[in-house]
Amino acid sequence: MSPEKRFTKEELLEKANEPAKKAMRWHPFYKGKIEVSPKVQIKSFDDFGVWYTPGVAKPCQDIHKNPKMVYEHTNKWNNVAIVSDGSRVLGLGDIGPEASMPVMEGKGLLFKYLGGVDAFPICLNAHDPEDIIQAVKWIAPSFGGINLEDISTPKCFEVLDRLREELDIPVWHDDQQGTAAVTLAGIINGVKVVDKKLDQVKVGLLGAGAANLCLARTLLNAGVPEENLCLSDSIGLLHSGREDLDEETTPEKWKFAQITNKENKEGGTPELIEGKDVVVAASIPGPDTIKKEWLKEMNDDGILFVEANPIPEIWPWEAKEAGVKIVGTGRSDFPNQINNSIGFPGIFRGVLDVRAETISDEMHIEAAYAIAEVAQENGLDEENLVPNMENTEVYIREAVRVGLKAMEQGLARKELSKEELREKAKNSIESSKRKIQNMMKSGDIKKPPLVDLS
C-alpha cells in the first residue's frame, strides 16, 4: 500500500522532514560515517614485521618489477576515490568541499555496505577543470576506480571525458552514468507496467544538466527514437534554432538540440510535458517546480520521475491527483525510489572484480537491464518499478552483467566465468554486511540517540 493511501498530506509532509531531523542529531553523535579498519589478522606484535618493515619490502620490490602486482599485494583492486569539488551538491548547489563531506562519506558508506567496496571521500579545494583532472591523476595510483560526484556542469563533462581518456582505471560520474542507469531501469519497467513500448513512447527530460544529458544519450542507445525525445533547460526547450547554443561553448546541449525535438517546438516546462508518455525531471527542487495543471496534458497512463533532492519537483500525491499513472522520486520514503544507490555499488563491484580499464555506456546500460530484471522477478506494479536497497541480489546481478560486458568489450584485465563473478560479488557484499552487523552487536558501533520528531 502506498504512502498516499496510508497518510494524510500533512502527515506525509511531516514524514518527509524526519530524515533531516535525524541527520542533525546523528551526524554529530558519530562524527563521521566511515573509518579505516584492518583486514589482516594481528595475533602478536611480531606480525607487524610482515605487514610493515622489514617484510613489506618484498611486496614493494615485486610491484616495482611488475606494476600489475599492485592489484595482488594491496587493496588497490577494491579502492575507489569519491572525488568532488562541492560545486553541485544534491539540491544545495555550490556549497564547497567541506560542506560536501557528509554526502561523500554517505556515498562511501553505501559503497561498502551495498557493494563491499572501500571508497574514500576526496573533497578538493579546486574548481578549475584542469586542477581537478590533475589532482585525480596524482592520486590515481592508489585506486582501482574513480567516482566523480557533485561536480557542476559543464565542467563535469570535460573532467569525465579527459580522465576516462587519460587514466587506465574506471572513471565514473555518478550524476551522469549512475542516474542514467537507474532511471533507464525505471523507464523500462514503467512502460512495461502500462503496456507501452520503449521504442514508441514520447519522452520529455526537464533539466539539461549532467543527469539528463547522459540519460538522453542512454535512452537513444537503448532504443528511444530521436524524434520521440525532447529536452529543456532553464531557458526553454532545446531546438536547432536556439541561438544561445553552439558547438564550442555548449557542446552537449547543442548536440541534442540538433537531433531531438524534430518539430523545433518552442516553449518551457508546460510545452515539454504536453503529449509525453514519460517525463523525467532532474531540475530545481520543488515542490512547485512542476504544476499539477501541466501534468494533465501528459498522455494517458503517464510516467513521471521527479528526481530533485531533497524535495522533488512536485509531491507524488499531487502528480497522482493530476492523473499521472506512475510516479517515482529520488527519496526512499515514497514508492519507486529512482536512486543511484541501487546502481553504483553493484556496477563498481563488477568493474573492480574484472579490473576493468573503463566503464563504457554499454556497461551501464547492461546494469540497467539487470536492475529491471530483478524487479520483474519480484513482481512489477505501479509502485514497484525497481528493487530497493535491501535487495542484495540486484547488486550481485549488476556486478555479473557489468563484468561480463567488460570482458566482451575487451576492457577487462582479469577473466572470470559468470559463476566466478557471481561468487566473488556475493562474498564481498555479504562479508561487508556481516562485519557491520557484528560491530553493531558488539557495541563497537553504538546505537544512535533518540530524536524528537515532534
Image (cartoon, grey):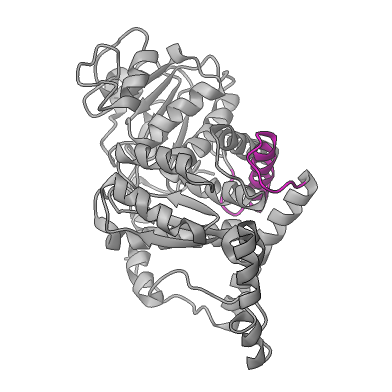
Q: Residue at x 54, y 44 (%)?
A: 1
Residue 320 in view here: no
Residue 192 in view here: yes
398 part of magenta stretch: yes
Q: Residue at x 30, y 36 (%)?
A: 154
The residue range painted magenta reads 387-416
Rendered position, 313 above or below 254: below
Q: Position of residue 338 (x, y in %)?
A: 48, 41
Q: Residue at x 36, y 65 (%)?
A: 23
Residue most toward the bottom?
Answer: 45
Q: Nearer the viewer, residue 232 or 61?
A: 61
Q: Position of residue 134 (x, y in %)?
A: 36, 51
Residue most toward the top?
Answer: 263
User: Which quadrant of the rendered structure holds the C terminus?
Assistant: bottom left
Q: Nearer the viewer, residue 23 or 359?
A: 359
Q: Residue at x 44, y 69 (%)?
A: 33
309 part of magenta stretch: no
Q: Position of residue 306 (x, y in %)?
A: 39, 36
Q: Nearer the viewer, residue 177 or 190?
A: 177
Rendered position, 278 above or below 209: above
Rendered position, 98 above or below 197: below
Q: How many marks?
A: 0
Q: Position of residue 360 (x, y in %)?
A: 55, 36
Left or right relative to 385: residue 239:
left
Where, by quadrant of the figure, is residue 452 drawn? bottom left
Rendered position, 79 above or below 59: above
Left or right relative to 277: residue 13:
left
Where, by quadrant of the figure, is residue 384 drawn? top right
Left or right relative to 115: residue 318:
left
